[in-house]
């Protein structure tokens, strides 16, 4: 009796059928692409003698080994992103381990050079050459087995012994897992190279090429090659397994590949559960002098024009303004959010490095004014001194279009923009900036370095935020209260535009903070002639801005439970 199938009627069944059909076509397309690549490779390599093919494999296997092994311990430590404190701690605890690692490095250099030499010796069609090739390849396999074991053991040991320096139990485990994924992924090409080399050296055609007699039966290399080429006894099962393996590899290594193809690396905020270091202060105010009066003789025949007696130079104003002394009474907790004694944010990332990103724009000049070491990087150094958090090796500059390439919830909480000239934005850049602030939750920190920047930035704000106006930031705003208290609001510094700090709010928080007083100039080494007190207040204002943006950004993407 024939079984009659019920016709597909429901929308869900139709959708499922369509999805399966599409997946099937994709599967066939991928298989066809691999077959095409294999045929092209076969056509290209078939005319080449085995000595040339093996020489190319030896060079590809040995060259990177020499480059990596010559870097030694220092290169390995630097690639892990250790702080100076953690590096010293690790060097002290793992002296014997590093001696073993140095031995690995020396063996790797020697083995890499030996493989390069065999690439030349392999041109001789002699039986002993084939044996040497097999021995060296086997040694390379053993070497990478030992290196892989070390790369598995060492991060785990560091995570156990340096738990506090890596952000506690969770932070150390996250760091260890990241190291495992990174280093084991780096070993994969070398393992594949060794395996391919061994398969080739145990093929019948290679043995015959090097004048080694073989039996009529196929060798193990031929059997492995045919098994891979034909997918074994059950091709359908083998090819179907490619899907789960491929999806798993995509989930595990996909983010790394995407970043290499243009995606931006996530902006991570330090993990922890701290509360702000609030400084209660007593302000010693400067007594204001009474304005001078000019007495005129009304009976005098001379007409007097009153001079501007109270005109004061900007640097004199700065000296008077920064003469206020702040006396800290008490420190509470550490910088962060969420309570507790360890600094950081509950939804941050362990071992994260704080970065300072500035916008690169067209239409004007000096977009990179006061950028780099000895300039805006000083703010990161001061931030690290105050908080203990790790910071990036330098400040960064990114085009506005790059903001759209950050993952949601992993974009920079703030971007810095400065200059002395015009600002020209395309319609796409305008939309990206608007979405970055209003949708993603980032903040634009603008800083006038003089010139036409003030006028240009105000015009830019009208385009990016239509219907919103720049307004004064009140002296009692939360931005001026944590972690450092500014009872009189932000310092004016050089106030190029002669205005108070202004901003734009969205849903109750600032999305734009504009300081017309050239904070970047105050962050410079030497503070461009300003006093040390001036630089100190500028640094503290920058730290307040960073704290405000970090807390606000994480609260937006991980709202606290009610």
Image (spheres, grey):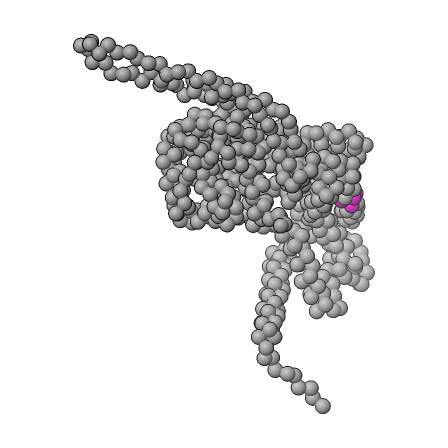
Q: Is residue 352 visible?
A: no
Residue at 43% x, 36% y is 472
Residue at 59% x, 65% y is 26
Query: Which segment did they paint magenta?
Result: 144-149
In front: 149, or 477? Answer: 477
Q: Relative to residue 88, is residue 459 drawn left or right? A: left
- In the image, residue 225 lies at what x, y percent? 73, 60
Q: Main secondary structure of the magenta part?
A: helix
Residue at 58% x, 48% y is 557
Compared to residue 195, the image places residue 272 above or below, namely: above
- In the image, residue 521 lies at what x, y percent? 47, 26
Residue, far left: 301
Residue 188 painted magenta = no
Q: Quadrant of the N terminus?
A: bottom right
The part of the image, by quadrant, that contains residue 85 is top right
Residue, far bottom: 1
Residue at 57% x, 34% y is 482
Compared to residue 21, the image places residue 203 above or below, namely: above
In front: 244, or 69? Answer: 244
- In the image, residue 379 lies at what x, y percent? 55, 29
Q: Is residue 188 visible?
A: yes
In front: 152, or 226? Answer: 152
Compared to residue 280, the image places residue 271 above or below, namely: below
In front: 297, or 263? Answer: 297
How many marks overall? Answer: 0
Q: Relative to residue 382, is residue 431 drawn left or right? A: left
Compared to residue 129, the image places residue 234 above or below, namely: below
Q: Relative to residue 216, is residue 382 drawn left or right? A: left
């Amino acid at each position: 009796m024939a079984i009659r199938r019920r016709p597909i009627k429901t929308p869900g069944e139709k959708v499922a059928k369509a999805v399966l059909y599409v997946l099937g076509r994709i599967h066939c397309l991928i298989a066809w692409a691999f077959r095409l690549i294999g045929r092209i490779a076969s056509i290209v390599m078939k005319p080449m003698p085995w000595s040339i093919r093996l020489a190319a494999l030896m060079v590809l296997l040995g060259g990177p080994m020499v480059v990596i092994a010559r870097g030694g311990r220092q290169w390995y430590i630097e690639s892990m992103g250790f702080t100076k404190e953690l590096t010293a701690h690790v060097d002290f605890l793992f002296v014997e381990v590093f001696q073993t690692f140095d031995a690995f490095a020396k063996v790797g250099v020697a083995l890499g050079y030996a493989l390069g030499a065999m690439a030349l010796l392999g041109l001789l069609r002699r039986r002993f050459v084939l044996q040497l090739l097999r021995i060296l390849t086997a040694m390379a396999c053993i070497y990478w087995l030992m290196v892989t074991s070390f790369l598995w053991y060492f991060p785990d040991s560091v995570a156990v012994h340096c738990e506090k320096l890596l952000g506690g139990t969770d932070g150390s485990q996250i760091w260890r897992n990241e190291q495992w994924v990174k280093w084991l992924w780096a070993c994969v090409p070398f393992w594949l190279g060794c395996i391919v080399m061994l398969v080739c050296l145990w093929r019948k055609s290679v043995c015959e090429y090097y004048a080694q007699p073989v039996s009529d039966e196929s060798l193990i290399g031929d059997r492995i090659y045919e098994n891979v080429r034909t997918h074994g006894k059950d091709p359908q099962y083998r090819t179907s397994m490619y899907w789960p393996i491929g999806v798993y590899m995509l989930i595990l290594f996909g983010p790394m590949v995407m970043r290499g193809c243009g995606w931006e690396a996530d902006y991570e905020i330090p993990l922890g559960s701290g509360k702000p270091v609030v400084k209660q202060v007593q302000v010693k105010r400067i007594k204001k002098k009474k304005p001078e009066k000019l007495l005129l003789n009304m009976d005098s025949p001379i007409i007097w024009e009153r001079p501007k007696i109270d005109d004061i130079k900007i640097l004199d104003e700065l000296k008077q303004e920064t003469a206020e002394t702040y006396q800290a009474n008490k420190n509470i907790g550490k910088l962060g959010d969420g309570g507790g004694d360890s600094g950081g944010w509950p939804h941050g990332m362990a071992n994260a490095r704080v970065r300072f990103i500035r916008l690169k724009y067209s239409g004007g000049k000096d977009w990179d004014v006061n950028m780099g070491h000895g300039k805006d990087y000083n703010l990161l150094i001061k931030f690290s001194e105050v908080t203990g958090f790790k910071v990036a090796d330098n400040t960064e500059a990114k085009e506005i279009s790059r903001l759209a390439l950050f993952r949601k919830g992993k974009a920079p909480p703030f971007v810095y923009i400065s200059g002395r000239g015009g600002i020209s934005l395309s319609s796409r850049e305008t939309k990206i900036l608007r979405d970055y602030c209003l949708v993603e939750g980032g903040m634009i920190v603008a800083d006038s370095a003089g010139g036409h920047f003030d006028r240009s930035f105000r015009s830019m704000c009208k385009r990016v935020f239509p219907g919103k106006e720049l307004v004064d930031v009140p002296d009692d705003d939360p931005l001026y209260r944590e972690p450092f208290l500014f009872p009189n609001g932000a310092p004016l510094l050089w106030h190029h535009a002669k205005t108070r700090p202004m901003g734009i709010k969205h849903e109750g928080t600032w999305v734009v903070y504009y300081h017309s007083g050239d904070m970047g100039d105050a962050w410079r080494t030497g503070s461009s002639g300003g006093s040390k007190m001036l630089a100190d207040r500028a640094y503290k204002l920058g730290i307040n801005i960073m704290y405000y943006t970090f807390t606000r950004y994480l609260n937006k993407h991980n709202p606290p439970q009610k």
